[in-house]
Amino acid sequence: MLRIAVPNKGSLAETAADMLVEAGYVGRRDPRALSAVDPRNDVEFFYLRPRDIATYVGSGALDVGITGRDLLLDSGSTAKEIATLDFGDSTFRFAGPNGRFNTLADLEGIRVATSYPGLVGDFLATQGVKAELVRLDGAVESAVKLGVADAVADVVSTGSTLRAQNLEIFGPVILDSTAVLISAGNALPGIDTLHRRLQGVLVARQYVLVDYDLPVELVEAAAAITPGRESPTVSPLRDPAWVAVRAMVARTDTNHIMDELYGLGARAILVSSIHAARI
Ligand SMILES: Nc1ncnc2c1ncn2[C@@H]1O[C@H](COP(=O)(O)OP(=O)(O)OP(=O)(O)O)[C@@H](O)[C@H]1O
Ligand SMILES: O=P(O)(O)OC[C@H]1O[C@H](OP(=O)(O)OP(=O)(O)O)[C@H](O)[C@@H]1O
Ligand SMILES: [Mg+2]
């Protein structure tokens, strides 16, 4: 039975749980349950703090897990990233009082508050900068105002938490993070199935199917607009002057592509959602 670690709280928990249900696995029936068995899929889920997931997976106690790339690197675990999951995107940045710091070198000898001392310590070491790390559990942006640090290193998503504390980012990007699938590196068959199913969920969320009718002589031009994954499906219509075309397109490009197809001469352009996919 494959043992899978899933975030029980925090920014990643809800989307991870939704994706697993969409991928055909049992959900967490009792919101306080620490684990759940899914006999039909031969897996067992363990609901853990996202910060602890890399430790469980790296030690081999669990086979595979969903966590943030930043948390994986901070943990120092030997677990490996095997796929990105395209949610929970964030950047990890230094920030300080408006106008006070400009470059990384300005951090020499300075107190930097962070909840990710492993990640930040490694980054500073590779850059040859010595700063004093102040480890905090969260709400790190308050550390400067309250005088326990001079700068912070933290997750930045919209930047609104920083702005509210009169802080601004400076220096290089420490890390671009996203939710990832991690494993201890053993090739277990259930891991591939989990990976493919989650990929299928991502495809179903990110792509739509577009169908349209087209004068046959415009197929090459239309294929350039909707190339699909491998190649668009082109089917004959009763009227030999026309064909029907079907292809997957990125959901965010849908209206732009419909306009282009219409401009080219396509008609009856229909867009439908993908319910599930195996790519
Ligand atoms: N806006 C965001 N705030 C916090 N974390 C985010 C955000 N967007 C993405 N993430 C990612 O979520 C993970 C943080 O997990 P964590 O459990 O710390 O969540 P959290 O939202 O900070 O919850 P909590 O503060 O209650 O522990 C990291 O991988 C982080 O990069
Ligand atoms: O750039 P923003 O969109 O403002 O998001 C970033 C903030 O969100 C997270 O805080 P969270 O709510 O998880 O609280 P925490 O600091 O206590 O973890 C993170 O630690 C930042 O503080
Ligand atoms: Mg947090």
Image: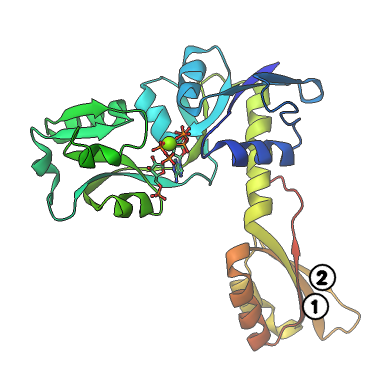
Query: Which residue type carries mark 1?
Result: Val
Q: Name the residue under label 1.
A: 243
**What number is the disc on residue 60?**
none
Q: Is residue 20 above or below residue 168?
A: above
For the residue carrying disc 1, how many other residues have a C-alpha within 10 Å: few (<14), some (14-19), or many (20+)? many
Which image quarter has ligand 2? top left
Q: Residue 274 occupies which quadrant of the picture?
A: bottom right
Q: Name the residue under label 2.
A: 235
Q: Is residue 244 above or below residue 150?
A: below
Location of residue 160 in the rendering, given as x and y in whole percent from the top left corner: 37, 54
For the residue carrying disc 2, how many other residues have a C-alpha within 10 Å: few (<14), some (14-19), or many (20+)? few
**Gap between marks 1 and 2 measured at Cα:** 6 Å
Location of residue 126 in the rendering, given as x and y in whole percent from the top left corner: 19, 32
Instruction: Give 165 or 93, whichever is nearer the viewer.
Output: 165
- Residue sticking out furthest to the front: 146
Location of residue 131 in the rendering, given as x and y in whole percent from the top left corner: 14, 31
> Regarding mark 2 in the picture, which secondary structure is present there?
strand
Image quadrant occupied by the N terminus: top right
